[in-house]
Image (cartoon, rainbow, N blue to C red):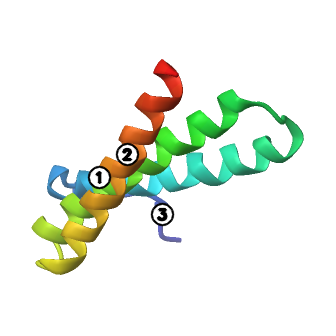
Amino acid sequence: MRNVEFFDIKTFSLKNISLYIQLFLIICLFGTIVASIFIKNDIMTLIIQIILALTMLIMAYNNKKIYKRKYMTYIYLAFSVILIGSVIVDIVW
């Protein structure tokens, strides 16, 4: 009988670590959105905005380096800068 491994260490490469970070951030984003349904306060919206801005930055990096798409990179960067600005304004205000 063969051993079947779920995650093979030999095939793991640091070249695509940004894809794993993007997956982790998306899972965190969905978890935070579900938690925000039950907890209604301003802190949860700030956390969602921060995670979404980080996800957009990682998506822009992945589009530029891995997928070689130029135009969506700028859109993701613009949205992330807007979200980061919104978070800074909410914290300062």
Residue ID at (18%, 50%): 14
Q: Residues within 10 Å of mark 2 (few under 14, many from 20)?
A: many
Identify which amino acid the numbered label 2 is placed on: Leu
In the image, residue 49 lies at what x, y percent?
Answer: 52, 44
Can you identify the residue that label 1 sits on? 57
Q: Secondary structure at mark 3?
A: loop
Sooner in the amino-acid sequence: mark 1 or mark 3? 3
**What numbered label is drawn on residue 69?**
none
The quarter holding residue 8 reads: bottom left
Q: Residues within 10 Å of mark 1 (few under 14, many from 20)?
A: many
Residue ID at (29%, 54%): 58
The quarter holding residue 23 reads: bottom left
In the image, residue 88 lies at what x, y percent?
Answer: 41, 29
Residue ID at (88%, 41%): 38
Q: Secondary structure at mark 1?
A: helix
Front residue (pair 83, 34): 83
Residue 21 visible in image: no
Sooner in the amino-acid sequence: mark 3 or mark 2? 3
Q: Nearer the viewer, mark 3 or mark 2?
A: 2
Q: Residues within 10 Å of mark 3 (few under 14, many from 20)?
A: few
Q: Secondary structure at mark 2?
A: helix
**What numbered label is drawn on residue 3?**
3
Can you identify the residue that label 2 sits on? 54
